[in-house]
Amino acid sequence: MAQKPSIPKGTRDFSPSEMVRRNYIFNTIKDVFRLYGFQPIETPAMENLSTLMGKYGEEGDKLLFKILNSGDFISKVPQEMLDEKNSNKLTTKLSEKGLRYDLTVPFARYVVQYRNDIAFPFKRYQIQPVWRADRPQKGRYREFYQCDVDVIGSNSLLNEVELVQIIDEVFQRLGINTTVKINNRKILAGIAEAIGEADRMVDITVAIDKLDKIGLEKVNAEMLDKGISQDAVDKLQPILKLEGNTVEKLAQIETVIGGTEIGAKGIAEMRTMFAYLENIELNTTVELDLTLARGLNYYTGAIFEVKSNDVQIGSICGGGRYDDLTGIFGMPDVSGVGVSFGAERIYDVLVQLDAFPEESLETTKALFVNFGEKEEAYCLPVLAQLRKNGINAEIFPESAKMKKQMTYANRKEIAYVILAGDNEIAAQKFTLKNMETGEQQLVDTQELINILK
């Protein structure tokens, strides 16, 4: 019995038409990255688990895909450990590698490993797939691409400002109206300190990060479940409900956390950043959101999240400042900042907005109909000329029935069909048919090139 073809849940195949659209997104993003002086790198799909574990918080560690060691891996595990049936302990014996969860931690590893070969500040971009053992749902996959842009080796807030400009430029080119929400982890640390729970910042930020998804009541319940006191949760309420413009919000939060050293520093950084942004022309809306937390543990400064204004789909880009991610690999005190564009969600937004361009550089523009050997010999030199002029063109590989060849052109959405029979060959011309309008015209080689270009 034949096996039914299938793929794992949370993964997808992409058809040629989908890949054309995906590459449009990737190429648009790459063009903007290069415009700002960023260079590409790639890292392996799998990393040592020692590189990945402990970098994403407890919830992140659970979502890592582990890779079984090769060979007879079970034979090396003590029988008492097998009898104990503790999966966490067993994993350390059965698996030394894992699929990367994001591109930032591998980037930090790369920077340390090649520190003598790169110039600091190092501006890199990276567009590769990542894997998370998450529950698949709409807009959330187990395998998906990230488009990361980071600068490492500089503390300057100009880097954060430039990232906002990159976000603005990318989404302007893609035709997506966006809002960039910005906060600072130092402000969040100041809040945790001010409400008497300085050592519970991770629990607080993980809960606050879910505010948009589950609402205030459930966020409060989660914090109480984590052991945060009712008094601290009560003190947090006015902060979570702050309103007003950026200046007003910072002034209000300063009255609460201005007495903490880390909180005061976070407020100062935000004031500097927004002062820069006020003098730059941006299409996107930029706002301070003091409830924005971003759950990843390695963020230490400014954090970003980008939402589409016209499609409800969650964040389509996000990131932040991390002050010592390289320190875990033996290179302390090297600060970096970056953002990641979510290609899958951007794709879904563009589909809903019907905003993909109609023409693509990756689609065949013209097909030569094949009538036989004599006609092939006549068409092939002209086919080569079209390609030399940058026109995507092909010839049907055999002299099949006209209906079959025209069906092929229609299914591939080829814009033009070129016909050359006895009459065209005698006149040293071609019949060019527009497949959308049905219009036909007799043209010579140069006219053919001019029209198709």
Image: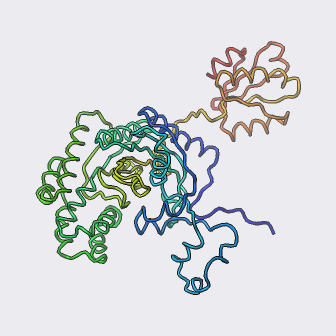
Residue 191: image x %, image y %? 20, 62
Outermost right residue: 373
Q: What residue is shown at x 36% (from left), y 39% (from top)? A: 168
Q: What residue is shown at x 20% (from left), y 51% (from top)? A: 265
Q: Is residue 209 above or below residue 287?
A: below
Residue 257: image x %, image y %? 15, 59
Residue 270: image x %, image y %? 22, 47
Q: Is residue 61 above or below residue 111?
A: below
Task: Give the total number of marks visible in the rendering.
Answer: 0
In the image, 418 versus 361, the foreground residue is 361
Residue 174: image x %, image y %? 45, 39
In the image, 361 versus 312, the foreground residue is 361
In the image, 347 versus 84, the foreground residue is 84
The structure's colour scheme is rainbow
Figure quadrant of the N terminus? bottom right
Q: Is residue 21 above or below residue 378?
A: below
Q: Is residue 75 above or below residue 51?
A: below
Q: What residue is shown at x 57% (from left), y 63% (from top)? A: 97
124 sits left or right of 335 in the view = right
In the image, 398 versus 180, the foreground residue is 180
Figure quadrant of the C terminus? top right
Outermost top residue: 427
319 sits left or right of 7 in the view = left
Question: On the image, which quarter does residue 81 sit in?
Answer: bottom right
